[in-house]
Image (spheres, helix red, strand yellow):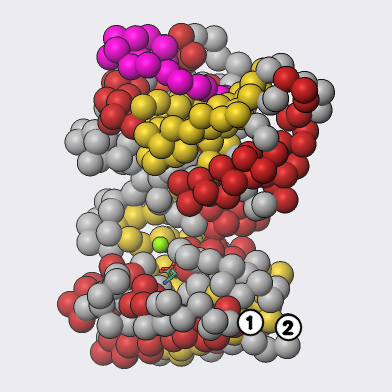
Amino acid sequence: MAIVIQKFGGTSVRDSSRRDIVAEWVYKASQSKDQVVVVVSAMGRRGDAYATDTLLDLIAGKDQTPAQERDLLVSCGEIISAVILASHLRDFALNVRVLTGGEAGVITDDTFGDARILEVEPKVLQSLLAEGVIPVVAGFQGRTADGRMTTLGRGGSDTTAVALGAALQASVVDIFTDVDGIKTADPRIVPDARTIAEMDYEEIFQLANLGARVIHPRAVEIGRQFGVPIRVRSTFSESTGTLIAPGHGTLDPWGHRDPDHAVTGITQLDHLMQFKVTPPSSMLKDWAYHLFMSLGDNGVSVDLINLFPDRVYFCVPPEKTQITQDTLKNMGYAFEAYDDRAKVSIVGSAIQGLPGVVGRVMAAMAQSDIEILQSADSHSTITLLLHRHSMEKAVYALHRQFHLDEEVPRT
Ligand code: ASP
Ligand code: MG
């Protein structure tokens, strides 16, 4: 018998009528040959009574609250959600049992607020499933080996779902949300962005990493390690969404690709700080080494590094501006800082070694009169740093250039 994990995000369980729709999905799955495990997020978004941000707002400014107690507070959101959803499921005469993350076997380290899963003990869930019970698990939380409540980082319910899927060798983890899958670009920028039918872990990981807020990156990591198929789909439509599975990217397992459809999606990140740093002339040896060591020691992680013998360009997130400036001043480096930067990336596992992709990126920028300030690439990405005001135009132009508005026939 196959096991299916159904994870429902905050907007899917926000109110009673939506929870009834969720209950229908669970009911439908329970009527098939599959065994079902349900994972939930806290109900709703900031302003909704028991949403994670609402709970956090209750202690806003109380910086002395230990991270362990914050975890106790926010973990209530998922527990409340699980109990209430279970009450809807019982209306469908389903035999359900609510479990905390810890009770479901999610064991983590003790990095409160951003804990890593160490292992999942599947015995409790397996015996419930064997008895015909549908476990309803509070997402986003786990417990340390000595029983303390932890949480997995914001958006972590996805990670709970995929981790349980890995431990139970589920046939699929369905991530139910309020959009019908992962789009070729942000639909607020490109109205005719399509839902990507299928992709591989590398592609989704890069999209999530480079700005698309689609799925918790750690969930993707675990999915990739264990080869768990993940489907991102809408609670409110019948669309099959996006399937993420081994060998389902633009590069097939045999290395075949369609050069006209080598790109999977476009993503963007706005509000980046770009720095140009020049060392004092007295210090032309080892300057870059000292620079990046000090930035690292001060907790600044840099991105888009372009290093030349006498200068370096790099970016930091806006919240690291002050500490970066202080570090540079203390070291006596001259610098210029620009706060109006954004980055736009194309992602596709089939672009590796494919001639002409960079040329097409440049063509799209040139035709739209967009100035490129920096660039970076990996085997599955090309990233451009741009002026913030040209970000939307660039996303739009790249979407067109790589034919992402066309339906891709898959073989
Ligand atoms: N409720 C948690 C959050 O808002 C976890 C999740 O929704 O995945 O971050
Ligand atoms: Mg989420």
Placement of 318 over or under 10, stated as above or below: above
Q: How far apart are marks 2 and 1 (CA)?
A: 6 Å
What residue type is disc 1 on?
A: Arg
Q: Along the horizontal axis of the image, is 19 left or right of 38?
A: left
Q: What stretch is highlighted in magenta?
A: 361-381
- Quarter of the image holding residue 164? bottom right
Relative to 100, 195 lies left or right? left
Query: Is residue 101 positioned above or below 97 on the image?
Result: above
Q: Name the residue under label 1.
A: 143
What residue sits 44% from the left and 32% below the top? 338
| Number of numbered callouts drawn | 2
Residue, x 49% and y 14% (percent of image)? 358
Which residue appears at 36% of the width and 73% of the height? 53
Q: Where is residue 220 in the image (x, y as percent from the top left)?
A: 55, 52
Residue 326 appears anywhere in the view = yes
Q: Is mark 2 on a helix, strand or loop?
A: loop
Residue drawn at the location 22% of the way across and 78% of the way down: 15
Q: Is 329 rendered above or below residue 391?
A: below
**Mark 1 burial class by Cα count in 10 Å: few <14, some 14-19, many 20+:** many
Please rate how many residues cluster around mark 2, counting C-alpha atoms within 10 Å: few if below 14, some from 14 to 19, many from 20.
some
| Placement of the N terminus among the 4 image quadrants | bottom right
Q: Which of 244 and 80 is in front in this view?
A: 80
Labels 2 and 1 touching (C-beta < 8 A): yes
> Is residue 35 placed above or below 191 in the rendered structure?
below
Residue that numbered label 2 is attached to: 145
User: Is residue 246 among what the camera can see?
Assistant: no
Residue closer to the observer: 304 or 361: 304
**Residue 124 location, x and y as percent?**
62, 85
